[in-house]
Image: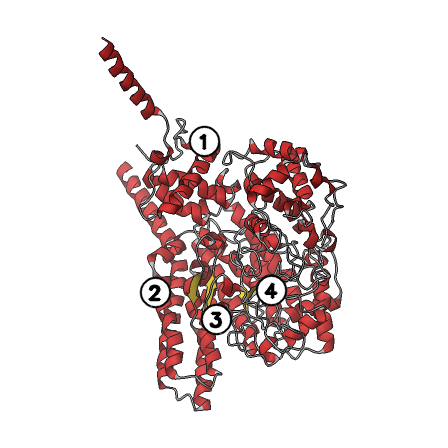
Amino acid sequence: MKILSVIAAIVIMTFCFSFNLQQKKGYTDLYNQSVNEFDGDLKSLLLSIKQTDLTDTSAVSLLRKQIGVSRLKLKGLDFWFRYFEPVAYRRINGPLPVEWENEVFEKFEPPYRREGGGLTLIEQALDEKTVTRESLEALLLPSIDAIRTFRADSITVNLASHNHFFLANRLFLLNLAALYTTGFECPDTNNIIPELRSMMIDVNQTYQTFDASFNATPLTKEYHEMFRKTISFVNAQPTEFSLFDHFLFVKDYVNPLFRMNQELINKYSVVTKNYNDYSLNNDCMSIFDKSLYAPQNTKGIYSLIEDEEMLSEVKRMGKLLFYDPILSANNRRSCASCHKPTEYFTDTTQATAFQFDHQQRLSRNTPSLINVVYNHLIMLDGKHISLQDQAKDVMHNTAEMNNSEKELLEKVLSCKEYKNAFKKFLKHTPEEKKVSLSHVVSAITFYYADFSQYTAPFDNAMNNKETISAEVKKGFNLFMSKAQCGTCHFLPVFNGVKPPYIGSEFEVLGVPEDTGFHKLSPDKGRYLINPAGETMNAFRTGTIRNASFTKPYMHNGIFQTLEEVVDLYDAGGGVGRRLAIGNQTLASDSLKLTKSEKASLIAFMRSLNENIIFDTPPTGLPASGNKSLNSRRIGGEY
Amino acid sequence: MKYLLTISLLVATYALWQCTPQKSSAYDIPDHVPPENKALFIERAEKGKALYKIHCGGCHGIFTKGKDGVPNFTSIQIDNYHATALIGLDPKNHAVAKKMSSEQIDYVITFLRIRKVK
């Protein structure tokens, strides 16, 4: 009897265990089956390309249809592919043939050349006169090859635990808000919403299968309910993407889903093994919260100090130094001379600032320091990887402050107030034996970073804390669709950092040297740092937050008004204005925006003006033992 | 007798000289590092050492006994640790490392990588 019951117990346990395995298999099976189907699709597409006469328009339109079918299949896999291996994904559905990247965890390394291929590029190539079967094949073969990556054990092993699911879902939701409705990788704008609808159904199936396979860590009822509502919303919306209500979609559907998913990440103690999660913050409950992704390190050498009192003393020193012209060789120029705290930490009166000699001009417009912390690479050419490096560079640069480290420190430490403070901080920075330039610049970055913490009426509206006008909503919807702004200025910061917020993007717009568009601006931009064909005249995409207060615009400060800026994009950039640029990344066709559409776009930009609380300049600067230094002016002069 | 004293004095001096810390011999700098960069490596390692003593050594050992269950860095452990630390997965969940700046992490890792392990 006893033996029998033991046997029965074993049988039951085995059954339960195999049942459990069987269940987990359901989820893995769905993945494998989808990958196989997609692989088959790509292979038959290759065959069709080989057989299609590209001069025959009806044959080409059949080919397009086939690409469309493969795209829909891919949309179902997007959920996993983008999260598991974004570099391989780019060979299946890359937006550009070549992209140079420095992601936040590889900032110390030279930029990587990432090759694109696949469906989007093939579709675009079909529109070109020079298209050949060979060129199409060359774009498709990397995709077929990339499928192998997604079948590798190192990837599929993730499917056995719940961890990847909630993190992949987070990326999916962020892409849903920022990319999928904008046509980011969808050349035919008529397909954007139909593809979105199909994708929502596929993801719903992924959800259901996951819940059945991982019954200990399911999505909540509340989540499923909200997702169902989202599907209904998307189905009920117009198919034309410029009539789609992007505002409501993000506010009432995607953002609540994001919050619920974040709660589940915490509830199920989800752990990451994927670098896509590098900068995302598990505790952030809204896409429109500034804690969404980790900003630049603003504390620098003071990173390990936690004592609030000491930190506020560091900040106080940072403020004094920010306004102190002692940092420049002639004791006349301070940070505040160009980054005027009264003008959003930029200079709205100069296209580009004077050099140190006060004769020549610098080549670029002074950027606002507000929200710079949300860039992974600093400067318009991405020259620096940290805020502290950038600040050091300005101090050394002969065209800017023209100072040596030794002289600068001598002068700073000749002031008793600075000297005492830094001596105190030195005890908490064991890596340095003496007060160093790092102590000076880290205090400065810690001070000005404070002004990036504020939100704008648009953020408040997204978080249901404020209502905004219909005009602003219309502007946002245009921004995300017809005006094609959202494909480079990604929400929520509306800069060049796209989900999962680990890299900064550079674009070639064809900004002219003169407002008559006679000549392209000679500034080589990113090329100066990373010489490559694609990087010539490319600049890091800036934020549009506070834009209406930070004129003049573009890297060379050529435009005085937002209207002029919108006109540049509307015309199709430099190429649209007949400048010869081989590598412009902005579409060169006119956007055909009407006057009232342009006005709405600008109204939306204004809704991103943040409610910043500025502070007042210090009432005095520390006195130096060297009397000749004591006549220096607060904030310097220009 | 006098002879013996001189010898023992010499021996003692030599022994004392051996005991004084010598920066150049405290680190194994990889061969591929160009000579002009060796000083930079040592400078960074020294910064890392100072940070390590205060912020890491209490648990991870080297200068103290360390704590049970926390890796005492051997060279193999540091190779594994380096990879994860640099891509940022581990420091995110590490009470101290997550607060450090990238430079500070770099200093500590440099120290751990090139210090001579007996």
Q: Secondary structure at mark 3?
A: loop
Q: Secondary structure at mark 4?
A: loop
Instruction: Identify the amino acid type marked 3.
Output: Leu
x and y percentages locating residue A174 in the rendered image = 56, 60
Disc 2 and disc 3 in contact, CB within 8 angstroms? no
Disc 3 and disc 4 in contact, CB within 8 angstroms? no
Residue A115 sits above or below residue B86 on the image: below
Q: Quadrant of the C terminus of chain B?
A: top left
Chain where mark 2 sits: A
Residue annotated with mark 1: B53
Q: Closer to us: mark 2 or mark 3?
A: 3
x and y percentages locating residue A466 in the rendered image = 74, 56
Chain where mark 4 sits: A
The Cα–Cα distance between marks 3 and 4, rounded to whole angstroms, is 17 Å
x and y percentages locating residue A55 in the rendered image = 43, 90
Q: Tell me what residue is drawn at x 70 percent, y 63 percent.
A: A551
Q: Closer to us: mark 4 or mark 2?
A: 4
Q: Is residue A492 visible?
A: yes
- On residue A296, the disc is none
Residue annotated with mark 2: A148
Same chain under badges 2 and 1? The reply is: no
The Cα–Cα distance between marks 1 and 4, rounded to whole angstroms, is 44 Å
Query: What colour scheme was applied to this rendering of the protein?
Result: secondary structure
Q: Secondary structure at mark 1?
A: helix
Q: Is residue B93 visible?
A: no
Residue A196 sits in which quadrant?
bottom right
Residue closest to the eye, A217 or A549:
A549
Chain where mark 1 sits: B
Is residue B71 shown left or right of residue A323?
left
Residue annotated with mark 3: A96
